[in-house]
Image (cartoon, rainbow, N blue to C red):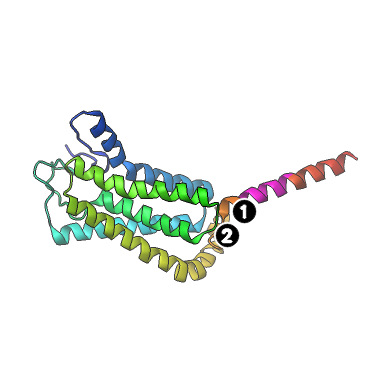
C-alpha cells in the first residue's frame, strides 16, 4: 500500500500537533486555490505563476535525488515510511515560492496600504508556519525546512523577474491572441496595477450604463 505523500501526515494526537498537521497541508489547499483562480479569472498571469510553482517543485525532486540526504530518524514520509529523501523540504519549498512570489507582486502593485499589509502578513505566515510544521511533526530537520524555503523564495524571485522582463511584455500578449485563448476568454491583466479596483469600477460603469439604457427605453 502506498500513501499519497502530499496529504500523508502523522502526529501524536494533541491539539497543537493537529493544527500543525493542517498547516502542513497548506500546499494542497494552495493547489486548489490556483486552479480555482485560473478557472474563474482565466488570466495568463495566474497560469504563469502556476507554471513557475510546478517547475519549482520539479527542481525540488532533482535536488532531493542529487543531495540524497535522509529524513530525520523515525519520519514516516512519502510512500515507503520515510525512505525518500528530505533535503530540501518539498512543502517548505512550495510555501517559499508561493509566499515569495506574491510578496514581490504585492510590493510592485498599487492598492490600499492596509490591504497590502494584511496580504503580506498572511503570506509571511504561510512561508514560516509551513516549514515550521514540517520540523515539529518530525518530517524534516530544521536545515531541510530552511533550505526548502530559501530555494522556493529564490526561485520565486527569478520567476518574478522573468515574468516582468520577458513573459509579460512578449509572451502574454501572444498567448492572448491565440484562437483557443479567445474561445476560452483568456486575457492578460498584467498591466493593470490594481485589478480588483479596476474590476470594481468596470462593474459600476456597466451598472450605470444598464440603468441609463433601461431608463431611455421606458421614456
Question: Magenta stretch containing residue 7, yes or no?
Answer: no
Specify the quadrant that holds the C terminus: top right
Give how far across and how far down residue 17 sits, in percent.
23, 34
Q: Image height check: is 208 above or below 47? A: above
- Give residue 192's mark: 2
Residue at image mark 1: 198
- Residue 58 visible? The answer is no
- Mark 1: give few (<14), some (14-19) or many (20+) Cα within 10 Å: few
Task: Name the side, left or right, on which 161 lies relative to 149.
Answer: right
Identify the secondary structure beneath mark 2: loop
Q: Residue at x 40, y 55 (%)?
A: 50
- Residue 137's mark? none
Q: Identify the residue at the far left of this view.
A: 73
C-alpha separation, residue under disc 1 versus residue under disc 2: 8 Å
Q: Is 4 on the left or on the right of 196, as rendered?
A: left
Q: Nearer the viewer, residue 103 or 51?
A: 103
Assign the N terminus to one quadrant of the image: top left
* Label 1 vs 2, first from the N-terminus: 2
Q: Are marks 1 and 2 in contact (CB under 8 Å)?
A: yes
Give how far across and how far down residue 203 sits, in percent: 67, 47
Q: Bounds of the magenta span?
A: 198-207
Which residue corresponds to the image point at 46% horizontal and 55% vertical from the top-left?
A: 46
Would you say the magenta stretch is mainly helix, strand or loop? helix
Q: Is residue 149 visible?
A: yes
In front of the other: 21 or 110? 110
Amino acid at each position: 500500500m502506498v500513501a499519497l505523500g502530499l496529504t500523508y501526515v502523522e502526529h501524536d494526537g494533541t491539539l497543537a500537533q493537529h493544527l500543525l498537521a493542517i498547516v502542513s497541508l497548506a500546499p494542497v489547499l494552495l493547489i486548489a486555490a490556483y486552479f480555482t483562480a485560473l478557472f474563474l479569472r482565466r488570466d495568463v498571469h495566474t497560469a504563469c505563476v502556476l507554471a513557475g510553482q510546478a517547475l519549482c517543485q520539479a527542481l525540488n525532486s532533482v535536488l532531493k535525488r542529487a543531495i540524497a540526504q535522509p529524513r530525520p530518524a523515525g519520519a514516516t514520509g512519502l510512500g515507503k515510511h520515510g525512505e525518500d529523501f528530505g533535503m530540501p523540504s518539498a512543502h517548505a519549498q512550495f510555501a517559499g515560492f508561493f509566499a515569495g512570489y506574491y510578496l514581490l507582486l504585492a510590493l510592485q502593485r498599487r492598492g490600499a496600504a492596509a490591504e497590502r499589509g494584511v496580504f503580506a502578513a498572511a503570506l509571511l505566515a504561510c512561508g514560516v508556519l509551513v516549514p515550521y510544521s514540517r520540523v515539529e511533526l518530525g518530517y524534516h530537520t530544521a536545515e531541510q525546512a530552511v533550505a526548502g524555503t530559501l530555494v522556493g523564495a529564490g526561485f520565486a524571485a527569478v520567476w518574478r523577474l522573468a515574468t516582468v522582463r520577458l513573459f509579460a511584455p512578449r509572451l502574454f500578449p501572444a498567448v492572448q491572441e491565440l484562437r483557443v485563448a479567445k474561445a476560452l476568454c483568456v486575457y492578460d491583466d498584467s498591466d493593470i496595477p490594481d485589478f480588483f479596483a479596476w474590476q470594481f469600477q468596470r462593474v459600476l460603469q456597466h451598472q450605470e450604463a444598464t440603468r441609463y439604457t433601461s431608463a431611455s427605453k421606458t421614456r
